[in-house]
Each structure stands twice: as C-alpha cells, then as structure tokens.
Amino acid sequence: MLSIRNATFAYSNKPVFEDICLEVEKGGFYCILGPNGSGKTTLLKCLAGILPLAKGKVYLNDTDLSRLHRNTIAKLIGYVMQEQETVFPFTVRQMVAVGRAPYIGLYSSPSAEDLAIVEEVIAEIGLTELRDKKYLELSGGEKQLVMIARVLAQKPQVLLMDEPASHLDFKNQERVMQLIKKLSLSGITVIMSTHFPNHAFAYADRVAIIHEGKILADGPTKTVMTEENLSLAYDMPINILTVKDRDNQDHHFCVAAQKAVV
C-alpha cells in the first residue's frame, strides 16, 4: 500500500539515510526501530510527504506521493508527531475537530457530518467523558489519545506514528499500544517508530531496523528481532528471553546482556 524506493535524505548535504527501500502492506502493523539519530523521525516525515527526498520516491497505492496535493495526502495519511502542544485553550472536542480540516473549506465551518465524525472518533477512543475538558489540562497519556483521535478524524488509510509511547508511564504505554493494535486490526495501515523494541515484539507484524543510515533488517517480527540484529543496531550486547503466560502462550522480550554494576 505504501512504499519507499531507493530513498535518500540529507540535511546540508549530510545524508541521514541512503538508498532505503520498504514495502508496507495494507492493514499491517509495521514497526521501525533504531538508535537516536538513526533517521526514524525523518523517514516518517518523508513517508508523510512533509520532507522531500533527495533521491527516490514514496508511493501510495502505486501513486507517486510528490504528485498529490497536500490536502489529498492529508485525507489518506495521518501523522501523529512525537510531541505536539498548543497554546490555545481548545477542548478535546475542538482538538479532534482540527482533524477534519482537509474536508472543510478555508472560510467554512464544520458540517453536521464533520461534527458527527468527531463525536464518533471521541467515543471510539474512549474520550467521551473528557470531550469538554481543556486539552492543556490533560495528562500525557490522555493528550496522546487526543492526538490519535484527531488524526483518525481525518479518516486516513495509513497512520504514521512517531514514538507514540515515549513519554508515557507503563499503564498508558499499554493503553496506547493496545489502541494502535486495534486500529491496525480494523484495516488501518500502521507504521510506527519506537525506542522500545519490546513494543515491536508484542504488537508489530513486521519490523525494519535502521542502522547507520541503512536498513539493517526488514521482515516479519520474529525473523528480524534477533539478538545479533538488536546488538548491532544498539551497539551493546542484547539477550532475547521467552516466557510463558498463564495461558501457556510464549512472549518474547529483550534485555541488556551487560553485567550488573556492583
């Protein structure tokens, strides 16, 4: 559904990544891993059509993304940034309504259909009780859910998410990750960057690991998430452990293999 082919991006002639190729199927949950500075955020911005590639192409349903109008892209691709604040005292309902902007004329107001979609999304994400509360008064986890709701109000086919759980506590991390998985199972294509490899183990169908501006590995989660690949990507020894839950199902997770400091 979404692909990036032979892609290179550079800031001031210094490449962030080079000759990257990725193919993302419809309805999948795709996770992008890599250390700080590896280009995960930049790659997502290129996939969203926000940053232009120096070389290569991004295709959405076999259409060159660079040939589409920005408004058209916004109806097809939703992008949840890593951090996003506002100085305006918007309510949750108003923040979510911003997601309908691609469908509303410059000098027009939201239609009855737009407002119905906003209420539908608010209910779907579980924000009904907060819909009249000021966005600035929310917790970090609640704000992240509002940002996801705002993007869903765009009715996108593809959802790009830049480290959506990076500033959340354990409970809110799980709340957000379970929601994202639910969205992918509903048919929305999810591409998410993260600093937490264990989120990829738990939720992703496929994983790409970026290392030194290249794709180190790309494919099904169990195939890509090896001790060798993770240790190379993060420049430290990593062990992968497997435990069984109460239902005797296997769960995989990774830990640092370094000795404890005494």
Image (cartoon, rainbow, N blue to C red):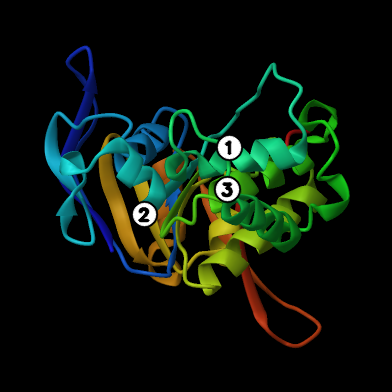
Residue 36 placement, left or right of 11: right
Q: Nearer the viewer, residue 162 or 252?
A: 162
Q: Amino acid at mark 1?
A: Val
| Residue located farthest toward the bottom when viewing the structure as drawn | 248
* Quadrant containing the C terminus in the rendered view: top right
Mark 1–mark 3 contact, CB under 8 Å? no
Horizontal and vertical percent position of residue 226: 44, 62
Q: Helix or strand or loop: what does disc 2 sit on? A: strand
Q: Can you tell which of label 2 and label 1 is closer to the viewer? A: 1
Query: What's the residue at 57%, 37% (across, down)?
Result: 109
Q: Nearer the viewer, residue 211 or 205?
A: 205
- For image coordinates 76% across by 79% down, the residue present is 245
Q: Which residue is mark 1?
A: 98
Residue sitting nearer the eye, 107 or 88 = 107
Taking the view exactly as shown, the residue that stands out farthest to the top is 12
Pointer 1 local density, CA inside 10 Å: few below 14, some 14–19, many at least 20: some
